[in-house]
Amino acid sequence: MTEANKTTESGGKLRTLTGRVVSNAMDKTISVAVERVVKHPVYGKYIKRTTKLLAHDENNECQAGDTVAIAECRPLSKRKSWRLVEVLERADSR
């Protein structure tokens, strides 16, 4: 979706992405689907590509369907190197 760069205390860039929570079945971990648009190398058509990232959710506050902002951090496990920054939009609770 969107990508914004901010600076950290050490002067490096802090990558943040916005995506949709796909799963929250794990303890303190959410699965976030991030969409990006890429141009096909031969035909030139723009195609949506989805990447699923695991992010750390310390308080287990996210539900499936929420729109969230995540930031890159140190590796927390084999596949988890992102952390939850904020919940931008809550999903409809049914």
Image (cartoon, helix red, strand yellow):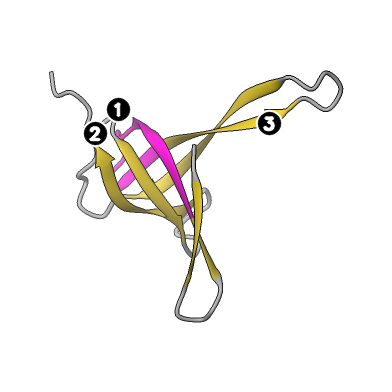
Q: Residue at coordinates 22% horizontally, 46% vertically from top-left?
A: 60
Q: Position of residue 62 (x, y in %)?
A: 24, 40
Select label 3 or label 1 by which is in front.
Answer: 3
Instruction: Report helix, strand or loop for mark 3.
Output: strand
- Residue 63: image tag: 2
Q: Residue at coordinates 83% horizontally, 18% vertically from top-left?
A: 43
Label 2 Cα crowd, 10 Å radius (few <14 / some 14-19 / many 20+): some
State if disc 2 and disc 3 touch (CB < 8 Å): no
Residue occupied by mark 3: 38
Residue 72 or 5: which is nearer the viewer?
5
Amino acid type, residue under disc 1 in the picture: Gly
50 horizontally vs 69: left or right: right
The answer to if 37 sits in the magenta stretch is: no
Above or below, 36 relative to 45: below
> Principal SS element in the magenta part?
strand
Residue 72 or 7: which is nearer the viewer?
7
- Residue 65: image tag: 1
70 horizontally vs 57: left or right: right
The answer to if 27 sits in the magenta stretch is: yes
Amino acid type, residue under disc 3 in the picture: Val
Query: Which stretch is magenta?
Result: 16-31
